[in-house]
Image (cartoon, grey):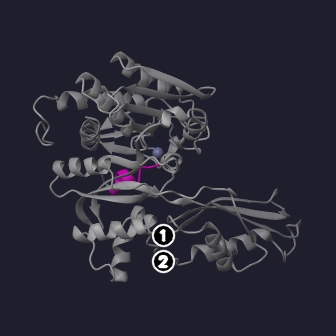
Amino acid sequence: MPDRLGRPSDAPIDWTAITAEALEVFRAYLRIDTSNPPGHEAPAARYLGGLLEAEGIPCEYIETAPGREALVARLRGDGTAGALMLANHTDVVPVDAAAWSLPPFEGVLRDGRVYGRGAVDMKSTGVMHLFSMILAKRLALPLRRDLVLLAAPDEEVGSDQGMAWLVEHRPDLFEIEYCLNEGACGLDEFAGTPSRLFEVAVSEKQLSPLRLVTTGTPGHGSKPAADNPAVRLVRALQRLEEWDRGLVVSPVGRAYLERLQVAGLVGDLDDRAALEAALKASPDTEAAFSNTLNVTMLDAGIKSNVIPARAEATIDCRLVAGQSREAWKRAVEERIGDPRVQVEFLYPVEPDVTVSPWDTPLARVIEDVLTEAFEDAVVVPSTAIVGTDNRFLRPLGIPAYGFIPCLLSQAERDGFHANDEFITVANFNLGVELMFEVVRRACT
Ligand SMILES: [Zn+2]
């Protein structure tokens, strides 16, 4: 695809060779098991860093805890603009290997797909970042701004030994103008209509997990029990499960829908039923427009013949940005309608989510690159439905975008944290090219 992106002729790149090289790096990276917990990401940081050092790019390895390292690499610009950071995480969520039909840590390439834990979340993007930096160095791009690569550990377990640690202990790293990380990608269809819909996350949902606790009277399991807390808890969970909470449209959501309407991907925004059907066609989109609630942990009882004294459930809740956590907790309490079921915040203090501005030169570069690559590309600021490390940078005033320049199918998007996680080689190659082009234009 030599001229598709309209690159200047003084920067010839043999994309067939580069993407082949990147693919092998990606597969080797997938073979490094960084399941978190426990993480043990130092070998991943050293692997990526070794490749950069071989190109003559200086690297720093920052130990955040034993066996856990962040990699920071920097290409110096002339200082006329602030730095662009490409940030990714090296850890992955653990696997239930028996549920996989392929080995999760072997970088299996089959039928045009690369399988493995981290294939989409987010080792593929890490390699896109890596090759953007390698190419910038090989081509000796005249950089106006520093290009910084940060490969951080511990994102999947809250970032206490990753981005949160770095922000606290190494504030110097974040004297940057922009950051690109995970949080959104391109979609190859929207509600059944083929599309090239590139979402770029400017914000994310408010994490607000709750714990439900109820107590009762313990007793012998042989007799009818009038006050079994496990039963009371199940009733409460049933009430929550059957709760139709409707859609929530934030200002970012409203702007998103208006762009999709212009592109013909949704119809009349006032036709609530049609809009709801379109948004619910994909669980990812539905999640972006609703306060989600899922039972994730249950605990009651100590023995098969003892009525438990206490039962507790943990529910994963993620609120549309701008929703009040207190109001949400009250709504949950009202819905349960049983004062003997206590509702508590799992994390008493959780910072409010922040929205990055979209009217920035970097956002314009992203829009230009994508719309020049694809005539029918729709580029739209969006809300990440998961927490990402960008949440630590946005409050510092750094525009931090979730940006994965691939057109993922629903099957690929379903791979996040799931079994048989994969990305197509075509999407990987596209991401390597587009990420570099964004970096090139943003930095030169
Ligand atoms: Zn991730």
Within-10-Å neighbours for mark 1: few <14, some 14–19, many 20+: many
Instruction: Please say whether residue 308 is visible from this viewpoint.
Output: no
Whether 438 is drawn above or below 60: the answer is below
Is 272 on the left or on the right of 320, as rendered? left
Q: Nearer the viewer, residue 364 or 421?
A: 364
Q: Give the residue displayed 51% in from the left and 52% down from the top.
A: 387
Whether 66 is drawn above or below 202: the answer is above
Q: CA distance from mark 2 to mark 1?
A: 7 Å
Specify start and end residues of the magenta stretch as a single range.
410-417
> Where is residue 114 shown, x and y percent of the image?
33, 39
Q: Amino acid at mark 2?
A: Gly
Q: Nearer the viewer, residue 180 or 37?
A: 180
Q: Give the residue displayed 45% in from the left and 46% down from the top.
A: 398
Is 263 on the left or on the right of 122, as rendered? left
Residue 203 occupies quadrant: bottom left
Residue 250 occupies quadrant: bottom left
Residue for badge 2: 246
Tell me, yes or no, whether the two marked residues, 2 and 1, touch with CB atoms within 8 Å: yes
Q: Amino acid at mark 1?
A: Ser
Residue for badge 1: 290
Q: Nearer the viewer, residue 296 or 256?
A: 256
